[in-house]
């Protein structure tokens, strides 16, 4: 589950921490007017995933650009479609680093060397007593080991 917060009544184990990247079309960094300054984002459309709607605001504030407003903000339900929209030059995406890294798409580039921790993480969540059930415990332990996380 990708969440900001988890109900404290549940057992929750954070599975990752992520960094927000600004992802652009490679051509944006070339030519006579390359995108090299974050303030240039005011001329572009920001693409944001509906499941992680605060990525743009989080990145903007952490980058010290609290008053920056893009030309528009478009919301997507699919990370793959967002990246394709970026590759087609329709805007810049505010996404987790792993989406960019997993894409292996030469048409895309990370804009700006500004590392911003995402407020969203993937979690393993269940009722506390569910961990006493063998299948749940086996899956939990396998997942934690597969991700290389330390034991609780």
Image: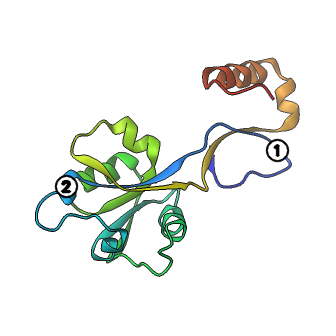
| Rendering coords of residue 141 (x, y %) | 73, 21
Is residue 51 depicted above or below 38 in this figure? above
Instruction: Give the label on residue 88, or none.
Output: 2
Is residue 116 depicted above or below 151 in this figure? below
**Is 76 in front, or is 102?**
102
Asked if residue 60 lies left or right of residue 46, the reply is: right
**Is 96 in front, or is 132?**
96
Asked which quadrant contains residue 140, the reply is top right
| Rendering coords of residue 56 (x, y %) | 47, 65
Tag 2 near tag 1, CB within 8 Å: no
Is residue 20 depicted above or below 133 in this figure? below
| Rendering coords of residue 14 (x, y %) | 69, 40
**Is 112 in front, or is 148?**
112
Residue drawn 67% across the image and 20% down it: 145
Asked if residue 135 lies left or right of residue 80, the reply is: right
Circle 1: element type: loop
The image quadrant where one finds the N terminus is top right
């Amino acid at each position: 589950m990708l969440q900001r917060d988890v109900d404290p009544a549940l057992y929750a184990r954070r599975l990752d921490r992520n960094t927000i990247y600004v992802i652009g079309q490679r051509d944006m960094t070339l030519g006579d007017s390359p995108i090299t300054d974050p303030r240039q984002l005011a001329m572009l459309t920001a693409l944001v995933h509906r499941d992680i709607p605060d990525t743009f605001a989080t990145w903007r504030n952490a980058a010290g650009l609290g008053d920056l407003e893009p030309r528009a903000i478009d919301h997507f339900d699919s990370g793959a479609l967002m990246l394709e929209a970026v590759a087609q030059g329709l805007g810049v995406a505010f996404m987790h680093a792993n989406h960019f890294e997993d894409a292996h798409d030469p048409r895309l580039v990370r804009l700006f060397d500004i590392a911003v921790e995402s407020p969203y993480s993937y979690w393993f969540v269940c009722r506390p007593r569910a961990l006493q059930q063998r299948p749940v415990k086996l899956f939990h332990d396998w997942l934690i080991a597969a991700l290389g996380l330390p034991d609780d």
